[in-house]
Image: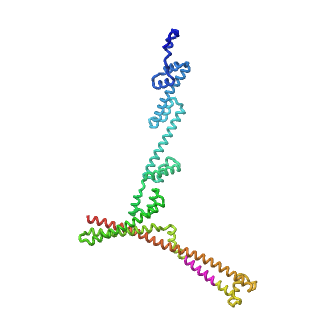
Amino acid sequence: LLRTADISPFFINKLIEISFARYTRVDVRRMFKAGVLDESQVYEAYLDLGYDEEKARNLADFAIIDARQDERDLTRSLIVSAYKKGVMNQAEAIQGIITLGYSSFDAEFIISITDADLARDKIDDAIDGVEFLYMEGELDETGVSIELGPLNLPAEQIMILIKKWDIAKRKKRTLPTRSDLEGFYRKDLIDLSALQEGLSKRRIVDEDIELYVGSLDVEIVESAAKEAERALKEQERLDRSTIKTVYQTEKAALDVLIADANRETADIKLVLNRYRISPDIMRQLEQTEDLRVSRSNLKLNIQSLKREIEELKFDVGLLSVDVLSDEGLLALEQRALALELEEIELEQAIPLILQDLKVRISEINELVSARQLSLEKIDTQIGRVIRSRDILDLQVRLDELRVHIAELKHAKALLRLEFI
C-alpha cells in the first residue's frame, strides 16, 4: 500500500490507476489474433505501454496486418485448391488472389506455379499407370515408349524409368529356395545350368555350388539305385505270390521299367555334369573332317621331308670319299650348278657343297620336328573330339530316356484309371 503521508493527496488516485501491470506487445498481438481485443483496444494498449500516438498507431497497424496475414494465406490456399479442382477458372482465381491484397504479377505467378503442378501431376499419373501395366507384364519396353510418347519425355528418362521398374520387378519376384531348386533338379524339371543359376542368384559362391551339385548328383544316383532295387524286389515278391491282381502285376512291371530308366538317367547326368563339353570342343566336333585332312597332309609332308633328308645324306656320302665315283662326280656337278659354283674348281667346291648339304639337312630336320609337333596336337584334338562325341551320344541317350520315362508314367496313369 502507498504510504499516503509521503505522497500528495492529489496524486494518490492517479498513482493507484497506473500501479497495475500493462499488456506486453506479444500479449497485444496474440489477443488481437484471438479476437479478445479489437483494433481500437490494440491502439490504446500501445499507448498504455508509453508509445506516443504515431508509434502506437504504427504498431497497431502492424499487429493488425500480421494477424490478417494468416487469414490471407488460408484464403489463398482455398482459392488455389478450388482452381485445382476446377471449381474456379484461371481468371477468377487470379482476381480472387488480387482481392486478398496481392499484386497482379504475384497473383499470375501463383496460378502459373499451380498450372505447372497440375501438369506434373498429370504426367505422374500417366507414368504410374504405365508402370503398373509394365510391372504386370502387359507392356514391354516398346509399349512403354509408345504409351509415354505423348508426354514428350526424353528417351533417357524413359530408359531410366524402365531400369528402375526392372529392379523393382526383381525385388518383387520371389526366388525359389535352395530346397525348391533341389526338388526341381531331382525331378528333372531343370537342368544343371538352371540349377547353378538359381543357386548363384541366392548368393552362393561358385566353389560351394560346385561342391553342392557334385554331392547332389551322387545322392540322386544312390537314391535311384535304391528305388530300382526296391521296385525289382516288389516285382519278385509278386511273382512268388499266389494271390495277386492284374493291376498289381502290370503296375510292378511299369515301376521296374521307370526305376531302371531313372537310374540310367541319374548315371548319365552324373557323367555329363563331370565332363561337360566346352564351346571350343563343340566347334572342334564340327571340324573333325578338317582335322583328319590336316593330319593326312602333315604325315605326307613329313614323309616327303624325310625322303629329302635321305637324298641329301646320300649325296654327302658320295662327296665325302677320297676318290669320287662317276655317280659322285655327277652329284658334285649338279650341286655346284645349283650353288652357282661353276667358276670354282670342283675339288675346291666340295667343302662348300658339303657344308651347304649339312645346313640343309639341319633345316629340314627342324621342319620335321615342327611338323611332328603339329601332328601330335592334331592327334590330341581328334582324341578329345572322339571322347566328346561319346558325351554327345550320352546326351542323346538322356533325351531318349526322358521321353521313355514320360511314356511309362503315362501308361501307369492309364493303368490306374483302367482299374479304378
Given the current orientation, which residue lies at the most extreme left position?
243
Whether residue 161 sits left or right of residue 317 in the image: it is: left
Total tally of numbered discs in the picture: 0
Please state the horizontal and vertical placement of residue 354, each as a whole percent of the image. Answer: 69, 83
The prevailing secondary structure element of the residues shown in magenta is: helix
Q: Is residue 238 visible?
A: yes
Where is residue 259? Give x, y as percent. Answer: 35, 68
Examine the structure image and report whether residue 102 is included in the region drawn in magenta: no
- Please name the residue shown 50% across and 38% down the image: 114
Examine the rendered structure and indicate whether residue 79 appears above or below residue 179. above
Give the colour scheme shown. rainbow
Q: Is residue 412 left or right of residue 394?
A: left
In the depicted structure, whether residue 334 falls above or below residue 162: below
Q: Quadrant of residue 346?
A: bottom right
Residue at 29 percent of width and 66 percent of height: 415
Q: Specify whether residue 295 is painted magenta.
A: yes
- Could you tell me residue 398's position as x and y percent? 41, 69
The answer to whether residue 380 is above or below residue 80 is below
Judge left or right: residue 185 versus residue 371: left
Q: In which quarter of the image is the C terminus?
A: bottom left
Residue at the image position 54 percent from the left and 22 percent from the top: 58
| Camera sees residue 145 | no
Against 162, is 49 above or below?
A: above
Q: Which of 373 and 45 is in front in this view?
A: 373
Image coordinates for residue 248, horizontal then vertical, percent? 27, 68
Specify the segment rendered in magenta: 294-310
* Among the 4 quarters of the image, the one containing residue 407: bottom left
Task: Please report the residue visible at 25 percent of the width from the left and 69 percent of the height from the top.
Answer: 244
